Image (cartoon, grey):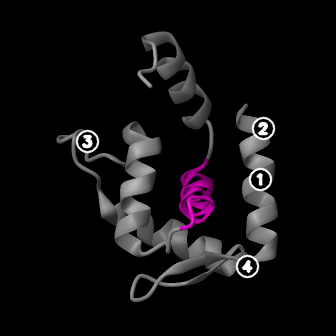
Amino acid sequence: MIKSVTSEHRDEGIYAKIEMQYLILLGIYSVFKKGEICTFERLVAECFKKFPKTFAFKRYPKWPDSLKFDRPLRTLRQKGLIVGGANDYFSLTKFGEEEAERIKKVRR
């Protein structure tokens, strides 16, 4: 489905107000809802696909910047929202899943 320019800009306006760590949380949530394992590479791809302006290189907007994930992932772990790491895969805790669902409702 092709989005109209208007809805695309509306989506950008909504997700531009959400902290990066919570966009990553939504990315993990999205991967799991699709029944897939959330590896680091899969997470980067999902976040870039859903939130390209936030996760792109500034000078190369058609490419994802994986360095933007390090600190937010640590923060999500410290808050008890996710477990796992880049060497294996990421998973949401029960609290993380509840938080992702809450954020998703607010986005609508």
Where does the N terminus fall, quadrant-wise?
Answer: top left
Q: What amino acid type should be assigned to the residue bearing mark 1?
A: Glu
Instruction: Decide which of tag 1 and tag 2 comes sooner along the chain.
Output: 1
Q: Quadrant of residue 4?
A: top left
Q: Helix or strand or loop: what does disc 2 sit on?
A: helix
- Coordinates of residue 58 in the picture (x, y in percent): 25, 42
Please tell me whether mark 1 or mark 3 is closer to you in this view.
Answer: 1
**Camera-side residue of 3 and 99:** 3
Q: What amino acid type should be assigned to the residue bearing mark 3?
A: Lys
Instruction: Decide which of tag 2 and tag 4 comes sooner along the chain.
Output: 4
Residue highlighted by disc 2: 106
Q: Residues within 10 Å of mark 4 (few under 14, many from 20)?
A: some
Q: What amino acid type should be assigned to the residue bearing mark 4?
A: Gly
Residue highlighted by disc 3: 58
- Coordinates of residue 17 in the picture (x, y in percent): 61, 36
Per the model, the C-alpha gap separating discs 1 and 3 is 29 Å
Instruction: Decide which of tag 3 and tag 4 comes sooner along the chain.
Output: 3
Name the disc covering residue 39, or none: none
Residue highlighted by disc 1: 101
Q: What amino acid type should be assigned to the residue bearing mark 2?
A: Val
Residue highlighted by disc 4: 80
Boundaries of the magenta span = 19-35
Please tell me whether mark 4 or mark 1 is closer to you in this view.
Answer: 1
Per the model, the C-alpha gap separating discs 3 and 2 is 27 Å
When the figure is inspected, residue 82 is found, relative to residue 105, above or below; the finding is: below
